[in-house]
Amino acid sequence: MAPRIQNQMAAFSGFRRARAFKRMQGFTYIGVLVLVALMGIALAATGQVWHTAQQREKEQELLFIGHQFQLALDQYAKHTPVRGRRQPLQLEELLKDPRHPEVQRYLRKIYPDPMTGSAEWGLIVGPNGEILGVHSLSDGEPVKKSNFGLADRLFEGRMKYSDWVFMHASG
């Protein structure tokens, strides 16, 4: 009888160990779920920081390109022949000025709008169809709303990129 009782005790002990092992597996599963959730939260935070950094970089690029257009429009007006138009009718005229027999370039290329990725720009047009300024076509909200330089002080508090208008200095 003693061996039989020992076998029963061993079987019962094995059963208890198996139950304890299954409970441990449950805790391991919960631990893995918590770890996955924490990794997801960290990844989401990293994605948000990355998105904001990308947005700021695009804003800096928009300011640079806008100033290039502004400078080109100023140079176009400055190099106006005696009886010529002071502003272009198309942005392409900034690439090669049709008013002069020799090549006059005020821009190297028509830059794409960094906010939309398109080469299409919003144009501020004068009464005779001449281009006085450009702006982005994006209605996105800027990250930068203050602390602009002196040249861009009019952008303070603007709520859309399309409100950042780069005008010919005397236009």
Image: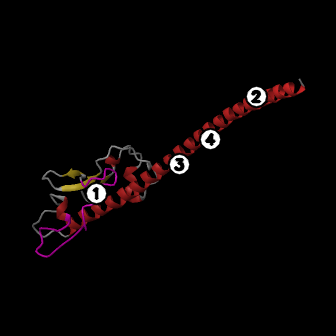
Say whether marks 1 and 4 touch (CB < 8 Å): no
Q: For the residue marked with disc 1, what is the amino acid? A: Pro
Q: Is residue 43 above or below residue 152?
A: above
C-alpha distance separating marks 4 and 3: 16 Å
For marks 2 and 4, give the CA distance. 30 Å
**In the structure shown, which secondary structural element does the residue marked by tag 3 occupy?**
helix
Up-down relation of residue 45 to residue 30 (above or below): below
Residue picked out by circle 3:
46
At label 2, counting other C-alpha atoms closer than 10 Å, the crowd grade (few under 14, some 14-19, many 20 or more) is few
Label 3: how many residues lie within 10 Å, few (<14), some (14-19) or many (20+)? few
Q: Earlier in the sequence, mark 2 or mark 1?
A: 2
Foreground tag (4 vs 3): 4
Determine the residue positioned at 58% across, 44% down.
Answer: 39
Circle on res. 112: 1
Q: Viewer-nearest of labels 3 and 2?
A: 2
Residue 35: numbered disc:
4
Is 149 placed left or right of 139 in the picture?
A: right
- Disc 4 marks a residue whose amino acid type is Leu
For the stretch drawn in magenta, what is the main secondary structure?
Answer: loop
- Residue at the spot 89% in from the left edge and 23% down from the top edge: 1
Q: Which residue is mark 2?
A: 15
Judged left or right of residue 8, residue 66 is left
